[in-house]
C-alpha cells in the first residue's frame, strides 16, 4: 500500500484496497491529513480509517460522484464476503455513513448483502426504552430551546433521539450558557461555518441564560427516582459531564437540587 506514515493497515485492509482502489487512495489522503492535524498515530486502526474513508466517499456520492458510489457498493460487497469474525469493527465503521434506505444514496444500502444489511438494520432499528422516550419528551416540552440539539441527535429508521449523546449535549450547552461560551473550547483552526454551527447549538441570545439552566436542572431533579433507566441516563450522560469544583462552570454545582447533588457526590467518590 502507498506509504501513509506509521499506519499501514492490516492484511484484511490490504485486501480491501486491492479490491477497491479508490478506498485506498482516500485512505492515504485521510490518514496523512489526520496525522498532519496532530492525531495520535495509535488512533489509526483499520476501523477508524474505514470511518474516515466511508465519510469522504459519501461526501463525494452526495456531490454526484459515480466512482465514489461504485466504491461504496464494492466495499459493502467485500465486507459481506469477508470472514464473519474478522473486521467487524471495520464493518461497523463502514456502516456509520451508509444512508438508510429511502434517503439520498439509499441504493448503497439496498445493494448490501444479507450479513452486512442485517448489521445495518440492527443498528438503525433503534428504539429508546419507553420511560426514557417519555422523559426526553417531557424535557423538550419544558425547555423548547433544546429542540435543535435533539434534532442533531436523531438517528435511525424511527428518527429517535439518541438519549445519551443528547443529554451530554444538554450538559455542555448549560455549562456554555453559564460561562458565556468559554467552556466550549472552540479551536482556532475551526472554520467560520463550524464555529457558527456550534455557537448556534450551545449558546443563547436570552438576556438571562441561567433561566434555562435552572429549568433543565429542575426537570432532571424532578425525574430522578422515577425510573431506573432514566436515573442511569441522567447519571451517566449529564452528571458525568458536570465540572468539578476547580473547573470552569463549577457554579452549576451550587444550583443542583438534593438528588443531583447526591449523584455528583457519588461521581466524585470515584477516582479521577
Image: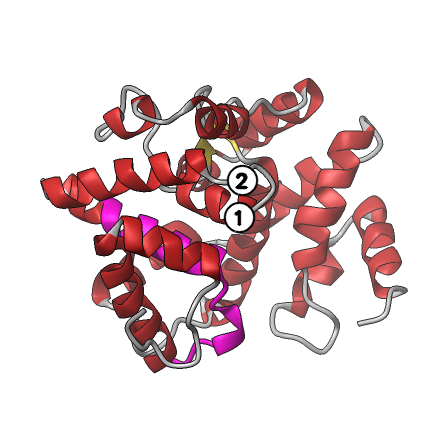
Residue 25, quarter of picture: bottom left
In this view, the mark in front (1 or 2): 2
Read off the residue under disc 1. Answer: 87
Q: Position of residue 239 (x, y in %)?
A: 72, 53
Give the labeled residue for mark 2. Answer: 83
Q: In this view, does 26 lie above or below 211?
A: below
The quarter of the rendered structure image containing the C terminus is: bottom right
Q: Is the magenta stretch mostly helix, strand or loop?
A: helix
Quadrant in which the N terminus is drawn: bottom left
Who's the residue at 87% across and 52% down the image?
A: 262
Relative side of 201 to 189, left or right: right
Q: Position of residue 166 (x, y in %)?
A: 54, 42
Magenta-drawn segment: 38-58
Can the viewer see residue 206?
Answer: no
In the image, is 253 to the left or to the right of 58?
right
Q: Which residue is drawn at 42% across and 71% down?
A: 8
Cβ atoms at labels 1 and 2 below 8 Å apart: yes
Q: Can residue 177 be seen in this view?
A: yes
- Residue 95 occupies which quadrant of the picture? top left
Crowdedness near tag 1: few (<14), some (14–19) or many (≥20) residues, C-alpha within 10 Å? some
Amino acid at each position: 500500500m502507498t506509504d501513509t506514515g506509521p499506519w499501514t493497515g492490516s492484511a484484511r485492509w490490504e485486501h480491501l484496497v486491492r479490491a477497491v482502489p479508490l478506498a485506498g487512495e482516500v485512505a492515504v489522503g485521510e490518514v496523512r491529513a489526520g496525522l498532519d492535524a496532530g492525531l495520535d498515530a495509535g488512533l489509526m486502526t483499520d476501523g477508524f480509517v474505514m470511518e474516515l474513508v466511508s465519510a469522504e466517499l459519501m461526501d463525494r456520492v452526495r456531490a454526484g460522484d459515480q466512482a465514489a458510489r461504485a466504491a461504496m457498493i464494492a466495499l459493502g460487497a467485500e465486507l459481506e464476503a469477508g470472514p464473519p469474525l474478522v473486521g467487524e469493527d471495520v464493518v461497523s465503521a463502514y456502516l456509520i455513513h451508509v444512508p438508510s434506505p429511502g434517503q439520498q444514496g439509499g441504493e448503497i444500502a439496498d445493494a448490501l448483502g444479507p450479513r452486512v444489511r442485517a448489521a445495518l438494520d440492527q443498528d438503525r432499528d433503534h428504539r429508546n426504552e419507553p420511560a426514557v422516550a417519555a422523559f426526553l419528551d417531557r424535557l423538550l416540552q419544558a425547555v423548547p430551546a433544546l429542540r435543535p440539539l435533539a434534532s442533531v441527535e436523531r438517528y435511525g429508521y424511527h428518527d429517535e433521539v439518541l438519549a445519551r449523546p443528547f443529554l451530554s449535549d444538554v450538559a455542555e450547552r448549560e455549562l456554555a450558557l453559564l460561562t458565556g461560551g468559554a467552556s466550549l473550547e472552540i479551536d482556532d483552526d475551526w472554520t467560520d461555518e463550524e464555529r457558527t454551527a456550534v455557537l448556534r447549538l450551545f449558546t443563547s441570545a436570552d438576556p438571562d441564560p441561567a433561566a434555562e439552566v435552572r429549568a433543565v436542572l429542575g426537570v432532571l431533579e424532578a425525574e430522578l427516582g422515577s425510573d431506573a433507566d432514566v436515573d442511569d441516563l441522567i447519571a451517566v450522560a449529564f452528571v458525568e459531564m458536570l465540572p468539578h469544583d476547580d473547573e470552569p462552570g463549577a457554579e452549576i454545582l451550587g444550583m443542583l437540587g438534593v438528588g443531583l447533588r447526591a449523584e455528583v457526590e457519588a461521581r466524585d467518590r470515584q477516582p479521577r
